[in-house]
Image (cartoon, coloured by chain):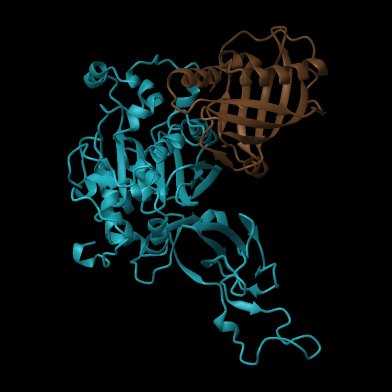
Amino acid sequence: MHNVLEKPSKQVTAPTRDQVMDLITAYAHSVDDMRLDVWPQFFTSDALYHVTTRENHEAGLPIGVVRCVGRGMMQDRVKAFYSANIFEPHTYTHIIGRSEFLEPTSEMAISARSNFQIVRTMETGRMDLFAVGRYLDEVVIEDSQPRFRKRVVILDSRNVDILIVIPL
Amino acid sequence: MSPTAQVERTEVAGFKWPPQGVTRAPYRLFTDPEIYRLEQERIFRGKTWNFLCLDIEIQNPGDYRTTTVGETPVVVTRDREGKVYAMVNRCAHKGALVCLKKKDNVASLSCVYHAWNYELDGQLKGVAFRNGVRGHGGMPEDFDAKQHRLRPVRVESFCGMIFGTFSDEVEDVETYLGPEMASFIKRNLGRPLRVLGTHSQMIHNNWKLYAENLRDSYHATLLHTFYTTFKVNRLDMDGGITLSERKWHHLSYARRAKMQEAAEYAEAKVHSANYESALDGPGLLEAWEEFDDGITHSIQTVFPNMCIQFTLNSLAIRFFAPRGVDQTELFWIYLGYERDSEEQSQMRVMQSNLTGAAGLVSLEDGCINEFVQRGTRADPDQSSFIEMGGREVDSERNSRATETAVRGFWHGYRNIMGF
């Protein structure tokens, strides 16, 4: 029901581990530098981006905090960020630990888990440890680029400070 | 509550409500620690019903769920006969928390400090070394276990929700809600429920600013511009506000959108109207008509601490706990029905993107009340101005461009606080 009708990717091989680590790093730096317009491009056209809490994840519950199915929904989030949503300006800095490579779900994909911390800096200068958790990623090659086919962001805490409007 | 039934008006040093009544809310209400302390006593531990948890969160014998009523820690349990109990989550010995997890399943409740052990209904059943050790120590001869139980909280279940109160006098939940509020809750929750997910949000404002915000139908399309953009909740939609008899609960509802541009928007050039309307991911708003009354959006509050939202097919309970005079934790429980098909469930899941801590439609509520908190704290003697839709405190069947439910909140608040 949420099909994004685009041409199927011509995928020939799985990405390398280096490509996966570069993707994870480039994604974080791009968000930290507030280049949100390119954020959806880090995903495949039919990707899942899901932010949830450890509690929901462990209980197998489908609703967390954000759920985008397909790049279109990610583009809507970006548009809403720039023209609809209202919030106090702030920026992130991601600190990401070394990735652990997991048993792949298919020959074409690489799966990795990476822990992260995100420090949020407000316009007033206030800095907070905003989010702590792990990324569970599945990366494939689409249109000759490594992209996330699935990125599940699992927050350690059930509690979000104020709001989330910039993707984690 | 009639004016004659008001509790004795109490002086909080130098505090006086402005003569304009509920069309003004003095900023001091949001920052004064003395008022905050009195609210714990008169509202949260007073003659109100507080949402504690859902029935399905403690489905099995031995299940417990911890929560707070105001700042008071409370645990809700189900005993071996299936009966639900609630009590203050504080050991009768030294006052330590007894239950530490959000949820668990246990045979009895045991305090970790000195191993005092309680039945699931809160009766004290065992005290470690009660008779001493090798004839020495132990409790005095006249120690009576019956005098030392977990302090009980009166509970009642309504439409799958468990409410608790510290008051012996407050009427039953359904009477407390009143017929109109109760019947709409039955519409939304009157069948077996399923939890689809939960999270919470820390908002940096006094709890009453959020309570006002929930009842403020005036701001909905002005602050929350995603709604307007995608034409899911316009002022030009047919809708209205119903207040309960005591004015402190409310129901705000909208019927199916009429897809025309309202002239008021075009003329005022408000932010809401200036937005491209196409969604790249239309799956977000895929919905089905669940009820035949035409109501597609509703927000319903129950004084003091909860709200039920039904946005398209996104059903959620929000409840909040004050965490100090200028901090509030807001909890979200997203729900579906047991009878939902997989497809219906998926639509509820997608629509959960509209609300919550990252809600496309309403994430602004996470910060807007803090902006008021920060804007007002230096001037406790000034007041907010609440006259949209007039100065009356009545239901408004034809428009949601009104602050009548906000006035209703202050009406109920003044009565119970004696202000």
The answer to which of A37 and B263 lies nearer the viewer is A37
In the rendered image of this protein, does residue B140 appear above or below residue B199? below
Left or right of B397? Residue B253 is right
Q: Residue at x 41, y 50 (%)?
A: B306
Q: Position of residue B9 (x, y in %)?
A: 26, 64
The image quarter in which residue A150 lies: top right
In the rendered image of this protein, does residue A78 appear above or below residue A114? above
Colour assignment, chain A: brown
Left or right of B33? Residue B406 is left
Q: Is residue A82 visible?
A: yes
Give the total of numbered labels.
Answer: 0
Quadrant location of the C terminus of chain B in the rendered image: bottom left
Quadrant location of the N terminus of chain B in the rendered image: bottom left
Q: Position of residue B219 (x, y in %)?
A: 32, 33
Q: Residue at x 58, y 76 (%)?
A: B123
Q: Position of residue B20 (x, y in %)?
A: 18, 48
Q: Position of residue B191 (x, y in %)?
A: 44, 50
In the rendered image of this protein, does residue B118 appear above or below residue A48? below
The answer to which of B381 and B82 lies nearer the viewer is B381
The answer to which of B288 and B252 lies nearer the viewer is B252
Q: Residue at x 39, y 69 (%)?
A: B167
Colour assignment, chain B: cyan
The image quarter in which residue A43 lies: top right
The answer to which of B259 and A162 lies nearer the viewer is A162
Left or right of A149? Residue B184 is left
